[in-house]
Image (cartoon, grey):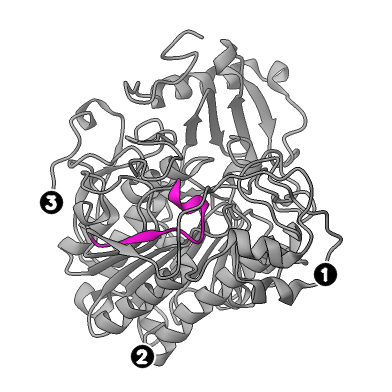
Amino acid sequence: MKPSHSLLSSLHFGLFSLACLLPGLDEEGGATTRPAAEAAPNIVYILADDLGYGEVGAYGQTRIRTPHLDRLAGEGMIFSQHYSGSPVCAPSRCVLLTGLHTGHAVVRNNWENGGWEQGAPEGQFPLPEEAITIAELLREGDYKTGAFGKWGNGGPQTSGHPLAQGFDSFLGYLCQRQAHNYYPTHLWKDNERLDLEGNDWFASHQKLTEPLESDDDYYERYSRQSFATDAMIEGALEFIDENKERPFFLYYASPVPHAALQVPREEVEKYAGAFEETAYLGEKGYLPHPTPRAAYAAMVSRMDSNIGRILERLERYDLAERTVVMFSSDNGPTFNGGTDSTFFNSAAGMRGLKCSVYEGGLRVPFIVRWPGQVEAGVQSAHLSAFQDILPTVVELAGMEVEVPTDGKSLLPTLLGLEGQQEHEFLYWEYAGQQAIRRGPWKGVRSALRKGDLSLQLYNLEDDPTESRDVAADHPELCTELEQLLAREHVPSTDFPLPGVDTKQ
């Protein structure tokens, strides 16, 4: 196992130590334990990209069809107060993989290694060699580990490459910028470039001054032969095929429904005439589309269908009862690229979208299914976040490790047992914003770039839309939260927090 990061000794982290026995039930329903070798399940973690809290049927969506996710929710547990690691892609994935919130994590913002020109260097800020990830820990526990989809934590030949961070296999986008086009020239398979048949390069961001004459023109301009997610899902299914006889960890990070609005035409036609449409001309980035609402719904449904293929493959090999399946999204829904988060009620009435530390940018769906272990059809209001996934899966694997983490294992909640540790608080920072949640209280600093360190305060039980700032009524509580904000932010030279680490 790699050594911990050089900063770790200075950080205020919790440590978890996991015994090699997992709790279970005896024949009469009493508490007992089972040896980890007999109990350790496969683990499948599915991550959507920019999918809002309200965009799954089980979370109230009525316009987009998600039958496989709804089935997963009906057969498992859904969490109503689960939070992403960050309101944007790369830092959120860093929190997920390392179990450290953004005041402690290495990656705290999207950082680019190159630009948009053809042949530009690929990748975002790489995880350092000494980072400790879920995949590394599970591989120490004799799990086979595979990542498929969008990565975003290090480009080719860097310390952040998936194969340098504990994964045995990878297929997908290494670079988030490339993921702005679902018909790229290539993906990456392990360390090798995988050229996609029939795909030539074209700019991922284009504008029109007026709609094209026909839908055919759109698809000729902005689609090609090989749709990227097809290769990703096939890689994930092949990984299950190859490892069905041994414990495995599958990280399927779907790039959907992140813009651009691109999906095979036959998928869009399934929503033909379903919504009133105005052609999107590219004025808010990404690529134009003649029926943007239908395209967006089709992208989510296509992702749902691919998730259904994973569930079917587990059932084919009789693995469903031996596999924990988790599903979430890396942050809240977006505001650009022709998407319409208002029309789809994507944030379920919460304030803010992607890039915001208000609830709409951070609260995400979270579904967990483990037949025979996690009670079906249950909703949990337990306060949880991405940093909890690392200690949870390590405990699921029956491992005994000691590693820095800001998370707390969710296993007691999942198994309906006593002893669930509660978070004293959850913390976020991003691009001139800070937020903290403690119990029902949410503290937000939204204007650090302007040098404004004032704290807004919301009671989410009384005000779930964060519309009434009650900071003036609770000065002592605000002081306590400000002290936590100061304590949990460890300065980063790579990602200084505006207004706190730097003067604006």
Residue 94 locus on image (x, y percent): 37, 44
Give the side of residue 48 with respect to residue 348, left or right: left
Give the side of residue 118 with respect to residue 354, left or right: left
Residue 473 locus on image (x, y percent): 72, 19
Q: Which residue is mark 2?
A: 317
Kindly give the residue lying farthest to the top in the view shown.
Answer: 503
Instruction: Answer above or below: position of 54 versus 10.
Output: below
Q: Which residue is mark 1?
A: 274
Q: Amino acid at mark 1?
A: Ala
Q: Is residue 188 magenta?
A: yes
State the residue at coordinates (77%, 66%). Answer: 63
Q: Amino acid at mark 2?
A: Tyr
Spatial separation of the CA atoms under disc 2 and disc 3: 32 Å
Mark 2 vs mark 1: in front: 1
Q: Which residue is mark 3?
A: 1
Tell me if label 1 and label 3 are in contact, CB under 8 Å: no
